Structure formats: C-alpha cells, structure tokens
Amino acid sequence: MTSYLSIGDFSRATHMTVKTLRHYHEIRLLEPVDVDPHTGYRRYSPEQIPTAQVVRRFRDLGMPLEEIRTVLAASDVATRNRHISAHLDRLNHELGRTQRAVAALQDLLTPPAPGDAPAIELRSVAAVPAAAITATVEAQDAATWFQGALGELFATLAGQGLRETGHAGGVYADELFTHHRGRATVFVPTDGPVRPLGRVEPFHVPPAELAVIHHHGPPTEIDRAYGTLATYVARHALAVTGPLREYYLTGPHHTPDPTHWHTEVCWPIFRTTTAA
C-alpha cells in the first residue's frame, strides 16, 4: 500500500510553507503525486522529500525558479552540475561585488590621515586626431556600451593598420550625469586618419585645461574620485562649462580584471596657476 503525506505533513517535513508548495504546484516545479478530484487535497509521496529539499536549498542560494526547473529536468549529472556551477559562479561574482562595496563603505567611514589626500594635477592637453564612436546612451547601459565601443575601435584600428598614439579616453556630456542620459564619445588617438567604418568616425579630441585625479579600480567606485575632484575644483580652481573627460591608462583592453584598471578623471577648468 502506497503511503502519502498531506500537504501539511509534507510542509513540516520539508520546511516549505503550504503557500509555497501550492505555488510550486501551480508552476509545475514540484507537483504532488495525487490531487483528490473532489476535494482538491494535494498528497505527496515520501520519495519527493529529497527533491523538495534540493529545491529549498537552491532557493536559499537565490537560484531563479526557471533555473531550478532546468536543473531538475537535466538528463544527466554532467548537465545538471554545469547549471549548478554556473549559478555558483554568479554567486561568487556577487559576493566579490558585495565585499568590494563593504570595503568601500568602510573606507568612506574612515577619516583620511593628515597629508593623505589624493594627488590632483593641473594639465593642459592639445587637440589630437583620433578614431571615435559617439552615441546618446542611458547611464545604466553606459558600461556595456563602452566595452562594445572600445572593442570596435581597437578592431577597426588593427584592420586599417593604424597605431595608437595615446591612451583611449572618453568625453561625457553633463546630461549623462545630471539626467542619466546623454552624449558619450569613446576615442583612441591615432597616427593617421581613420576611414569611417560602422560606428567608427574620425574625431579631433579638443584641447582643454583639466584638473586630473587618478582612480585605481573598477568604475563602480569611481564616484569617489569624481567627488574628490569636484571638491578640489570648487575650492582651488575656476570650473568651466564643458564635458567631463576620462583617460584609460589600464582598462578592459589590457586586462579583464577591473580591480587592476587605472583611470584618469578630468574636470575642465580655467587655469590661473601653473601647479596644483
């Protein structure tokens, strides 16, 4: 004789609420072995307990229901483990991002030591010819757009036999910061004119007088450099209207590890002194 568990007993056995079990039945993730056609009562078999425990563990790890369904439906152990490993990789990535955010917050709460202020340089840059991609982008999409644009630029230069004559950079309109949507240009200085191809166009990076600060690390933490630079400019320089600029001394073209990236953040100013 087959033994069944009521939904209440199955709930107690698996530590899943009755509401959750009903939902999993509705989406066909964890279906009871029998449903009384007259009363609608759900009944589960003891053999379903391990499956329910696996589902609960995956949910505790934040795995989406559709992925859990894929894991349970896997035809072999290797396929199942591949899906599980992919989710664990995402968890490790999220953990790393959380740890970096915690470290950044702790750093913010720690007063800087006397004389430990970051160096800020005043610099005049001349106009240079470059290859560039320009678009109006949403701030939330800027990182993805930037990676794609930079890759396309380097591929185009290589295809046309052009040489880089300086660090890649970006020119960003105020609206990208104030309204989270604005014009952005990513450029690479070149030793000759680029032929227009796809999104790539010739571009002359305009001359500028800049206050410059260095940022080491991922772009998610670059706001601190911007804040420090803005404070300096407000106190010691004459800011002028104009797009902000960045130079990528070490970036995704050099290493995929964002913790090793090195960016110069540049604020346009009107220079009245020769030293910072």
Image (cartoon, rainbow, N blue to C red):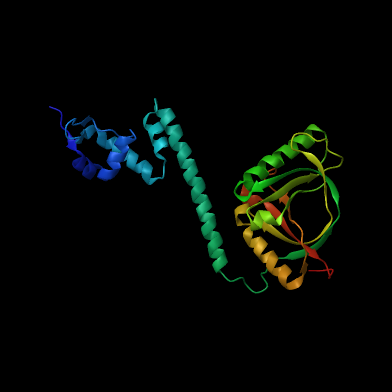
Q: Residue at x 47, y 45 (%)?
A: 91
Q: Count the marks.
A: 0
Q: Is residue 255 visible?
A: no
On the image, the x and y values in percent for residue 17 come to: 27, 46
Camera-nearest residue between 162 and 8: 8
Camera-nearest residue between 99 and 240: 240
On the image, the x and y values in percent for residue 3 come to: 15, 32
Q: Could you tell me which quadrant the N terminus lies in?
A: top left
On the image, the x and y values in percent for residue 201 come to: 79, 40
On the image, the x and y values in percent for residue 249 come to: 73, 51
Left or right, 116 with respect to 240, comes to left
Residue 147 vertical position relative to residue 224 in the rendered view, above or below: above
Residue 182 vertical position relative to residue 22 in the rendered view, above or below: below
Left or right, 144 with respect to 165, comes to left
Q: Residue at x 33, y 42 (%)?
A: 56
Residue 55 figure quarter: top left
Residue 27 figure quarter: top left
Q: Residue furthest left?
A: 1
Left or right, 57 with respect to 110, comes to left
Q: Could you tell me which quadrant the C terminus lies in?
A: bottom right
Q: Residue at x 31, y 38 (%)?
A: 24
Residue 124 figure quarter: bottom right
Q: Is residue 225 visible?
A: yes
Q: Residue furthest bottom?
A: 114
Q: Residue furthest top?
A: 75
